[in-house]
Amino acid sequence: MNKETMELIDKIAEKLGTTSEYIMQVLINQAGIVVYREAIAIFILFVIFGTLVYCVLITCVDKDLKGDFKNFLVAFLVVGGMGSLFMIKESAYIITTALLNPEYWALSEIISKIK
């Protein structure tokens, strides 16, 4: 950690009435919680999107839909899938960073809040 970062952490600690070591320990512990939160969010996203795809496919097969509604459903699934992939990519980055290097995650959280 460079001197400037430590000074910023000390300023935050002073405003909160605690020590910088305590703040870092709290943030490192928070990294584990963030991992679980992001993993649960990805799981819920998969369940919702999978259920939606299943329902749409069943509807299309059972009713033999044609025309604009079918095109709308396909477009909706493509856009929703792309959005889901973006969210999964962001969550995967957070999970791996917080799990494998919680100190870096804690520092990046502090720096992002200061900027």
Image: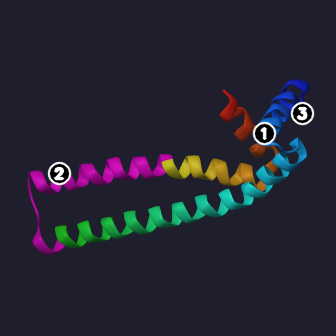
What is the magenta segment's predominant secondary structure?
helix
Q: Residues within 10 Å of mark 1 (few under 14, many from 20)?
A: some
- Is residue 101 shown to the viewer in this render? no
Q: Which residues are magenta?
A: 61-86
| Residue wearing tag 2 | 71
Q: Are marks 1 and 3 in contact (CB under 8 Å)?
A: yes
Locate residue 79 relative to residue 102 in the image: left or right.
left
| Residue wearing tag 3 | 1
Report the amino acid beneath label 3.
Met
Helix, strand or loop at mark 1: helix
Classify residue 13 by image quadrant. Answer: top right
- Is residue 46 shown to the viewer in this render? yes
Does residue 101 show up magenta in the picture?
A: no
Report the amino acid beneath label 1.
Leu
Q: Quadrant of the N terminus?
A: top right
Identify the residue at image location x=65%, y=64%. 36
Q: Residue furthest front?
A: 17
Locate residue 110 relative to residue 85 in the image: left or right.
right
Locate residue 10 relative to residue 86 in the image: left or right.
right
Q: Is residue 13 above or below residue 55?
A: above
